[in-house]
Image: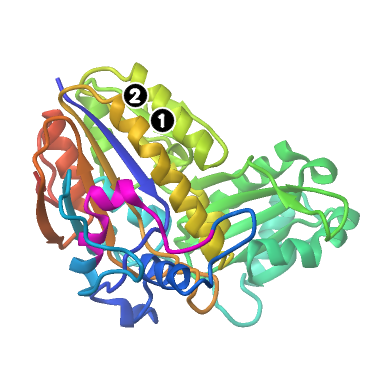
Amino acid sequence: MARAFLFVLDSFGIGNAPDAEAFGDLGADTLGHIAEFCAAGAADRAGLREGPLHLPAMSALGLVHAAKLATGRVPAGMALPERVYGVYGAASEVSRGKDTPSGHWEIAGTPVRFDWGYFPAEGDAFPPALVEAICREGDVPGILGNCHASGTEIITRHGEEHMLSGKPICYTSSDSVLQIAAHEGTFGLDRLLELCEVVRRLVDDYNIGRVIARPFVGSNPGNFTRTGNRRDYSVLPPEPTVLDRLKEAGRAVHAIGKIGDIFAHQGVTKLTKANGNMALFDASLEAIEDAEEGSLVFTNFVDFDMLYGHRRDVPGYAAALEAFDARLPDLDRRLKPGDMVILTADHGCDPTWRGTDHTRERVPVLMFGPTLRSRSFGIADSFAHIGETVARHLGIAPGAHGRSLI
């Protein structure tokens, strides 16, 4: 019986979503612009990386071909390989947001057809009634921030006052989200997580997709650092996903990284936490060794988005892609007949783009395994086809929103 391994390179868009202009992202291209900077020498960093973007494994799986399908051009400094060793293409999102839950749920076969609630970009982000409820029911003396902000910047700005006052730092972004930063020592990690559970309930009336705990450590703005104890508190997907359908069919669903949080732990049979792309890759390899026949291993590689896309760090993003690419041959060697790996993304986060938010882009879909024959499927009109490819590969009934790409 087959096994499936679904890896989401968080924010690794490849440009030209059909509706990008409606999101203010016309021209955004995460892969294309990173490659352009690398080819021009603008992504060299001493001790980290230099030169053109070097992704031989993903290129051999069809990444460059997929980018050309999406944008009509080959990324700068990269070349179309003569032979491709997988099934490849690009996919466009139909969900109405460019956020993490929308992208992942659609990948899992369940597009988000409703509109999320969002907090205003100007002035106070949160209405007075919500702030009052957070303070009362969360037992805090007030909040700091109350605005759209970069997570690292707002911790630098308010971290010391937070440590002295006990007021949590609350902020948002262009996503449907309320984020709460607090110091693990002075405020306490457990207390932060309990506060986020309270706030998750309070923002339901505002149709907010996620509440995110952002713990940090350090003694001053010069050394404040966010830790790996982030937690996402998501609403439930609007209908059963391929994870639910697999679990109902008696199959194992291994959620690695923040996948469990994104799906509100629905449809998950085994949860593995890890911090950092390489630790997540190691955990995925361990799951490949142990995964049962007929099972799904689903991993989110969050560093691309959290550490490099949002922070507009082009050399860091390029180096992370190259490090991930270098691990793929080891993954390939561990596959058994009948196994299938899918590499994709949930949205873009072009580190050369204005602002610090996600970008509306197409994503690559690269599929490989010992028994898959090489070909292109072109451009899929929904991420939901990815979930339906997993469903067909694992032999469960199809869902309502997509079709298998194989």
Q: What's the magenta region? A: 50-67
**Does the segment drawn in magenta span residue 102?**
no
Percent position (x, y) of residue 4? Answer: 24, 32
Against 34, is 260 above or below?
above
Residue in the image at 35% along x and 55% along y: 346
Q: Label 1 is placed on what type of residue?
A: Ser
User: Is the C terminus in the top left, top right, bottom left or bottom right quadrant?
Assistant: top left
Residue in the image at 43% along x and 44% along y: 324
Count residues near mark 1 (Cα–Cα under 10 Å), then give few for <14, some for 14-19, many for 20+.
Answer: many
At mark 1, the secondary structure is helix
> Which of the numbered marks, if any, corresponds to residue 143?
none
Dividing the picture into quadrants, the one containing residue 122 is bottom right
Residue 207 seen in render = yes
Kindly indicate whether the residue at mark 2 contacts the one at mark 1 (C-beta within 8 angstroms): yes
Q: Which residue is mark 1?
A: 284
Q: Label 2 is placed on what type of residue?
A: Ile
Residue in the image at 47% along x and 46% along y: 323
At mark 2, the secondary structure is helix
In space, the residues marked 1 and 2 are separated at their CA atoms by 6 Å
**Does the segment drawn in magenta span residue 56?**
yes
Of the pair 200 and 356, the residue shown nearer to us: 356
Percent position (x, y) of residue 76? Answer: 35, 71
Of the pair 4 and 147, the residue shown nearer to us: 4
The colour style of the image is rainbow
Q: Which residue is mark 2?
A: 288
